[in-house]
Image (spheres, grey):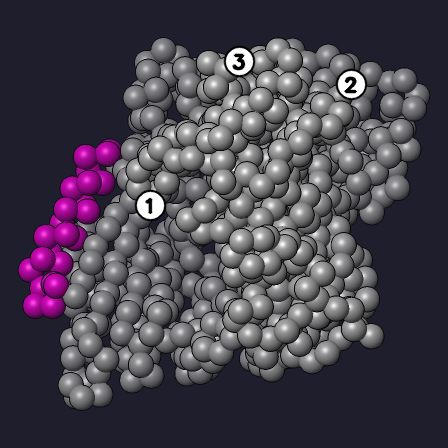
C-alpha cells in the first residue's frame, strides 16, 4: 500500500480527506528510480475543480506516455488543510507518490483564471520554493506556467521561470528533452533556461526587461540577451486527427465538478465575439473527426465507468457533424443509462429535439446568452444573436413543454447606454409575453425567466483590450437600472434578476491587463492572507485594498483608462496569431456598430491563416 | 439475478466516505460491463444497495452490497470482472447469488458486525488497558451517553455488545447493528475511557470491520451467519 504524506489524524480532521490520497482509477504510478524527469502538474484550486480540467488531463497522460517521465498531480490544499500544513510545517506533496513537490524537476501550473493567482503563491510557498524565480537555486524545481491567463503573464511573471504560450501538445517534448540533456551534462539551471527560451512558444521572463514612461505606461519591452527572440509565438496543435488522442481520464473518488466524460469536439470558435478572449486565442477553429470522436466516447465511457458524457467546445452548434455525433451518442448510450449533456448549444429545432430526448423537460431550462440588451449593443460586441431568433427559439421551446428560461448578459460593455441596460428588462418581458400568447390549456403553469448579469472585463488579445472598465459604484448603478426596469415590467413577477459581485470583477480586470509591477500587489495580498479569491466565501476585498495601499499601485491606472492605440501593451511581445492590426480594425468596427461575418461566412483576415489549417482552409480547394 | 458482493477496503481508500464508495462501485460495475438492472423513469438509476455504511477512516474486510443483474452471470465472472478494475485498496472477496425479494436485501438483514480495534501510536490510553477493559465488560450494565440525530440520551450499551475479547494488543468486538439497538466501537471505547475517568479522543483508535452478520436464531438465542453465507455460487 502507498504511504500517505499526511497522518491519519490530520486526514480525519479535514473536510473530504479523499482529495489528498491519490490512487484513483486511470492515475499513473511509476518507479521514481526508473525515470529521469519528475513533473508535478498543478492546478491552483481545490481538487474538485482542478481534477475536472480537460487540459491538465491531456498533458498528464501525454507526459506519462514518456518512459523517462513521471507526471503527478498537485492541487491547492483547501483552507482547513492549508492551516494545518503551515502550522505543522508539512511540505506540499504530489498525489501519486505523495513525495514533496520540491523534490521534483518541474512544477507546472495551469492558470485558467486570474482569481487563482494567490493560490499560485500558496503552491510555491507550501512547497518551500522561493516565490520569486530570481531567488531559486539548483535545488528548486523549474516553475512553468501555462493556460489562457499566460496570454498576459506579466502580473505573475516574476514568480515563474518560464511560461508556455499556447496549446501544450506541441513543444513540451522538446522542452523535456532539453532538460534531460542539460541535467545529464551537469548543466546549470540558467543553461537550461537559456536553451528553453529559444524553443518556440517559451517565454522566460528573466531574459526580458521593461522600462516605463513617467506616466506609467510602458516605454520599452525586449530581450536582454541576443539569443532569445523578441516575439513569442503562440503554439497551436494543428493535427487534431492523427496525433491527437483524448486520454482515459482519472476518475476521482469524490464527486468532482465535472463528474463525467468530457469529449472535446473542436478547438476554437468561428464567431469572433469582440469581448471573448477564448474566441481569439484559440483560433483557428479546428474540428475533430466524427468517427474518431465516436470511438473515443466509447473508450472513455468504458474506462471510467462514468454515467454521463458532455461535449466540450466554445460553440457546439458550429461543429459541422454535430447531428451525426449526437444521434450516435443517444442511440448507442442512452439505453445504457448514460446521460448526455450538451452545453453551448444554439436553440433551434434540432437542439430542442435532442434536448427533449436527453433531458427531463420539466426539470431543465433553456439558456440564451444574448450578452447585451439591445440589437445596437449586440452589433457592437459582434454577437450574432438577434431578438427574432431568441423569441422564436423561446416560443418553439414553450410549445415543446419548457417553461423556464435563463438569460445571460454583461453590463459595462463599451459604448453602453441606459437604453441598452433597460433593453435587458424589455427582452425578458417580451419572452414572458410570448409565453402567455399560448392558450392557457396548452401552457404548463407560469413562465420563469432568470436574468443574470456579469460585469464586463476587457481581456488581452480581444478588440476590447483598449477599453476602459468602470468603478464599483458605477457597476452597481448599472445593475440597479436593470433591476428597476425589470420591476416596471408587466410580467415582473415571472422575471428573477441576479448580478455578479462588482469588487471581484474590478480585481479580475486589474490582474487581466496588469504589467510586471502588479506582482508586488499579488504578493502583498497573499502575505496578508488572501487565498481562494475565486470563492466568494473566502474572497476578502479589504486585504486587496490594503495591498494596493501598501505597494502604492493604483488599480485605476489599469482598469479605468481607455488605452491609446499607440501604447505598448504588456502582452504585445506575444504573437497570439490574431494580429494587432486586426484587433484595431475590430475595435473601430465595434465603435461603428458594424458586424463582422464569422469565419465560415467570410475570412476577416485576422492573421491565424499563417498556422496553415483549420477553418481557414475549409472548402477552399 | 440478485447478487451479493463482498469486498474489502484497506489502506488510503478508508478515507473515502460511504456515498463516494457507492459512487465508486457504480462506476466499477460499468467498467466491468456487468448487466446491471436500472430502475425506470426519466433518470434511471442502478438497482444497488449497500448493507451497512462504514465510517470515514474505518477499514474493512467484510463490506457488502446487493445488486440486480438483468440475467444470470457466473459468480466467478462477476468477481473477476470487478477485480480487474479495482483501485488499490478495494478488493472483491466474493460474489454470491441471493434470493429475490425485500426480506433478503442486505440492508434489512444486518443484525451484528465484528470489529477489531487497535490504539494508534502517540495517544494517551489507560495503563493496563487489556485487563481493565475486560473488567469494564464484566459489569452487569454499561450506562453511557449516546448521541442521536435529535438528542443525547443515557443508554445501557451492555446488551448490544455480544462479545468483547482482547488478543495480541487488539480488541475484538461483536456489536449489535439493528436499528434502535445499535452500537459502534467508538461508543464502547468512549464508555471505557469514561469508566477510567479519562478523556476519549476518537483519533486514538483505528477500527476495522471484520464481518457483517444476519441473525437466523430465535428471539432468545442468536445464530449469526455472515451475509456472504446466505448466498450461493453460480456457474
Q: Can I make out residue B62 in this image?
A: yes
| Up-down relation of residue A9 to residue A524 (above or below) | below
- Estimate the x, y position of residue A102 in percent, counting from the top left: 71, 20
Q: Is residue A483 magenta?
A: yes
What chain does mark 1 sit on? A
Residue A493 quadrant: bottom left
Which dot, 3 or 2, sits closer to the camera? 3
Give the residue number, with chain letter if any, for mark 2.
A189
- Which residues are the magenta region? A471-493
Residue A335 quadrant: bottom right
What chain does mark 2 sit on? A
- Estimate the x, y position of residue B49 in percent, counting from the top left: 56, 62
| Up-down relation of residue A320 to residue A54 (above or below) | below
Give the residue number, with chain letter if any, for mark 1.
A456
Q: Are marks 1 and 3 in contact (CB under 8 Å)?
A: no
If you read the primary sequence from the N terminus, does the residue marked by circle 3 or circle 2 appear first? 3
> Exactly how many numbered labels are in the figure?
3
> What number is the disc on residue A87?
3
Give the camera-side residue of A176 and A9. Answer: A9
Amino acid at each position: 500500500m502507498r504511504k500517505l504524506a499526511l497522518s491519519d489524524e490530520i486526514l480525519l480532521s479535514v473536510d473530504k480527506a479523499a482529495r489528498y490520497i491519490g490512487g484513483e482509477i486511470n492515475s499513473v504510478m511509476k518507479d521514481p528510480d526508473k525515470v529521469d524527469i519528475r513533473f508535478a502538474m498543478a492546478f491552483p484550486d481545490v481538487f474538485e475543480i482542478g481534477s475536472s480540467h480537460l487540459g491538465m488531463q491531456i498533458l498528464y497522460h501525454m507526459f506519462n506516455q514518456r518512459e523517462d517521465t513521471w507526471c503527478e498531480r498537485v492541487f491547492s490544499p483547501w483552507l482547513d488543510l492549508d492551516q494545518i500544513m503551515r502550522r505543522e510545517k508539512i511540505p506540499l506533496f504530489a498525489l501519486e507518490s505523495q513525495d514533496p513537490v520540491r523534490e521534483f524537476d518541474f512544477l507546472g501550473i495551469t492558470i485558467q483564471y486570474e482569481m487563482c493567482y494567490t493560490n499560485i503563491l500558496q503552491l510555491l510557498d507550501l512547497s518551500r520554493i522561493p516565490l520569486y524565480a530570481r531567488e531559486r537555486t539548483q535545488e528548486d524545481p523549474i516553475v512553468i506556467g501555462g493556460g489562457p491567463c499566460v496570454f498576459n503573464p506579466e502580473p505573475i511573471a516574476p514568480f515563474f521561470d518560464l511560461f508556455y504560450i499556447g496549446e501544450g501538445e506541441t513543444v513540451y517534448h522538446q522542452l523535456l528533452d532539453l532538460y534531460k540533456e542539460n541535467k545529464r551534462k551537469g548543466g546549470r539551471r540558467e543553461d537550461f533556461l537559456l536553451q528553453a527560451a529559444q524553443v518556440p512558444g517559451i517565454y522566460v521572463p528573466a531574459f526580458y526587461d521593461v522600462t516605463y514612461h513617467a506616466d506609467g505606461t510602458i516605454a520599452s519591452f525586449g530581450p536582454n540577451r541576443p539569443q532569445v527572440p523578441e516575439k513569442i509565438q503562440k503554439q497551436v496543435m494543428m493535427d487534431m486527427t492523427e496525433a491527437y488522442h483524448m486520454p482515459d481520464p482519472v476518475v476521482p473518488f469524490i464527486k468532482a465538478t465535472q463528474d463525467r466524460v468530457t469529449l472535446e469536439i473542436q478547438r476554437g470558435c468561428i464567431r469572433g465575439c469582440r469581448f471573448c478572449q477564448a474566441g481569439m486565442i484559440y483560433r483557428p477553429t479546428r474540428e475533430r473527426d466524427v468517427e474518431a470522436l465516436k470511438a473515443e466516447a466509447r473508450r472513455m465511457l468504458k474506462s471510467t465507468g462514468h454515467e454521463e458524457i458532455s461535449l466540450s467546445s466554445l460553440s457546439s452548434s458550429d461543429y459541422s457533424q454535430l447531428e451525426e455525433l449526437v444521434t450516435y451518442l443517444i442511440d448507442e448510450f442512452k439505453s445504457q443509462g448514460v446521460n448526455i449533456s450538451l452545453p453551448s448549444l444554439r436553440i433551434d429545432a434540432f437542439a430542442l429535439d435532442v434536448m427533449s430526448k436527453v433531458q427531463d423537460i420539466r426539470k431543465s431550462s433553456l439558456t440564451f446568452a444574448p450578452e447585451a440588451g439591445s440589437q445596437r449593443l449586440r452589433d457592437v460586441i459582434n454577437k450574432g444573436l438577434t431578438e427574432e431568433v431568441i423569441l422564436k427559439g423561446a416560443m418553439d421551446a414553450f410549445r415543446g413543454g419548457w417553461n423556464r428560461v435563463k438569460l445571460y448578459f454583461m453590463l459595462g460593455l463599451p459604448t453602453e447606454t441606459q437604453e441598452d441596460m433597460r433593453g435587458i428588462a424589455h427582452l425578458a418581458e417580451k419572452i414572458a409575453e410570448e409565453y402567455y400568447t399560448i392558450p392557457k390549456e396548452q401552457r404548463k403553469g407560469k413562465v420563469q425567466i432568470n436574468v443574470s448579469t456579469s460585469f464586463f472585463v476587457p481581456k488581452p488579445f480581444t478588440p476590447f483590450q483598449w477599453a476602459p472598465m468602470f468603478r464599483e459604484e458605477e457597476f452597481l448603478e448599472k445593475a440597479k437600472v436593470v433591476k428597476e426596469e425589470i420591476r416596471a415590467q408587466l410580467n415582473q413577477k415571472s422575471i428573477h434578476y441576479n448580478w455578479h459581485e462588482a469588487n471581484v470583477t474590478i480585481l479580475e480586470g486589474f490582474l487581466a491587463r496588469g504589467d510586471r509591477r502588479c506582482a508586488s500587489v499579488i504578493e502583498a495580498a497573499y502575505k496578508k492572507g488572501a487565498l481562494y479569491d475565486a470563492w466568494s466565501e473566502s474572497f476578502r476585498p479589504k486585504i486587496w485594498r490594503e495591498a494596493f495601499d501598501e505597494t502604492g499601485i493604483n488599480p485605476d491606472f489599469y482598469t479605468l483608462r481607455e488605452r491609446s492605440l499607440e501604447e505598448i501593451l504588456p502582452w504585445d511581445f506575444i504573437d497570439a496569431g490574431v494580429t494587432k492590426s486586426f484587433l484595431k480594425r475590430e475595435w473601430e468596427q465595434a465603435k461603428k456598430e458594424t458586424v463582422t461575418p464569422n469565419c465560415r461566412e467570410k475570412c476577416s483576415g485576422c492573421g491565424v491563416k499563417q498556422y496553415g489549417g483549420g477553418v481557414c482552409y475549409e472548402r477552399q480547394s | 439475478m440478485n447478487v451479493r458482493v463482498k469486498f474489502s477496503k484497506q489502506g488510503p481508500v478508508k478515507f473515502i466516505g460511504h456515498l463516494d464508495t457507492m459512487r465508486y462501485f457504480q462506476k466499477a460495475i460499468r467498467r466491468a460491463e456487468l448487466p446491471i438492472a436500472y430502475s425506470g423513469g426519466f433518470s434511471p438509476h442502478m438497482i444497488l444497495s449497500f448493507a451497512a455504511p462504514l465510517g470515514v477512516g474505518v477499514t474493512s474486510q467484510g463490506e457488502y452490497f446487493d445488486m440486480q443483474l438483468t440475467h444470470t452471470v457466473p459468480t466467478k465472472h462477476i468477481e473477476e470482472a470487478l477485480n480487474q478494475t479495482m483501485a488499490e485498496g478495494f478488493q472483491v472477496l466474493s460474489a454470491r447469488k441471493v434470493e429475490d425479494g425485500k426480506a433478503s436485501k442486505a440492508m434489512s438483514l444486518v443484525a451484528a458486525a465484528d470489529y477489531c480495534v487497535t490504539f494508534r501510536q502517540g495517544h494517551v490510553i489507560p495503563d493496563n488497558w487489556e485487563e481493565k477493559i475486560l473488567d469494564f465488560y464484566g459489569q452487569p450494565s454499561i450506562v453511557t451517553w449516546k448521541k442521536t440525530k435529535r438528542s443525547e440520551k443515557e443508554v445501557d450499551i451492555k446488551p448490544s455488545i455480544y462479545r468483547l475479547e482482547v488478543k495480541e494488543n487488539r480488541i475484538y468486538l461483536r456489536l449489535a447493528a439493528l436499528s434502535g439497538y445499535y452500537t459502534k466501537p467508538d461508543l464502547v471505547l468512549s464508555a471505557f475511557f469514561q469508566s477510567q475517568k479519562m478523556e476519549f479522543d476518537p483519533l486514538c483508535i483505528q477500527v476495522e470491520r471484520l464481518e457483517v452478520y444476519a441473525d437466523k436464531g430465535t428471539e432468545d438465542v442468536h445464530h449469526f451467519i455472515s451475509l456472504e453465507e446466505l448466498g450461493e455460487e453460480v456457474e
